[in-house]
Amino acid sequence: MKKVVVSGSFDDLGSPGVRFLEEAGRLGEVTVLLWSDETLRVQTGKPPAFSQAERAYLVQAMRYVSDVVIVDEPLRQAHTLLQELGFQPDLWVVDQAGDDARKKAYCQMHGLEYRVIGADQLKGFPGLAYPAGSQPAPRRKVIVTGCYDWFHSGHVRFFEEVSVLGDLYVVVGSDPNVMLLKGEGHPLFPQDERRYMVQSIRYVCQALISSGQGWMDAEPEIALVRPDMYAVNEDGDKPEKRRFCLEHGIEYVVLKRTPKEGLPRRQSSDLRGF
């Protein structure tokens, strides 16, 4: 498989950045040269919205990324890091905004392919294909549910913890049900985009969109997946969920909302308009 390198800040990583990583991943194994906090300050003249540690955690959690390397120098010299690392990629991939004559010249000089991913290639939110025979042996199935409107490191940490308990299936609240439960102005992002962000995390086996209503909007999907366990965090613990699991013989597990070590506690409501 070809070795692909991409670079950037990936600050406030949203669906455009994830779509770019996915398209880069179609070309080979992706190594991300991630700007350090200081590099980002040099390039933008302002501090990052999210720290280097949090950005690295999010990027590394993407199923399309093989490795993350921190760039501790200004981007105008970042390409020299490849030589220092002794890492020789086959392709350097950029989006249209990142198209850079210096990168292109470096690639030409060192025999690397230089590839620009156009905006047209980044449209939409494709589903994840599961080729026959690619799935591992069945484990216990664990289901979680939620809105996942402003996706953040807290969601990733929750998925990481739950995935230890079994194969993780995530049911993302539909647009009508999120509005029903949270009111006007919700959700900020449409259901297909929210499902896409969830599905992009390596700890998730499959992401679905709920087709029911209320706190148990995922009931039809639960019937489809037939999980052994329903996991929630403290905020998502609801009597309706407990009662449903008791009636259907599903183990109900409540996890504490604990951030990844060294990272801040995140909640989507705090990040609206961040």
Image: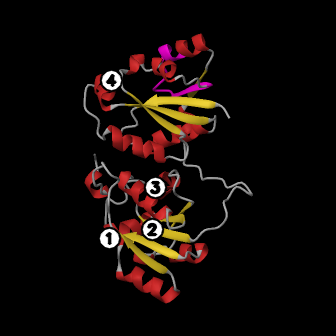
Determine whether, in the image, residue 226 is placed left or right of residue 253. right
Figure check: 241 above or below 27: below
Cβ atoms at labels 2 and 4 below 8 Å apart:
no
Between marks 2 and 4, how big is the CA–CA gap?
A: 39 Å
For mark 1, give the secondary structure. Answer: helix
The residue shown at (60%, 53%) is: 127
Instruction: Specify few, some or many for label 4: CA neighbours under 10 Å numbering under 14, 14-19, or 20 or more.
Output: some
Q: Amino acid at mark 2?
A: Thr
Cβ atoms at labels 1 and 2 below 8 Å apart:
no
Q: Which mark is residue 145?
A: 2
Q: Which mark is residue 19?
A: none
Determine whether, in the image, residue 42 is placed left or right of residue 7. left
Give the residues in magenta: 90-104
Q: Which mark is residue 234?
A: 1
Q: Which mark is residue 194?
A: 3
For mark 3, give the secondary structure. Answer: helix
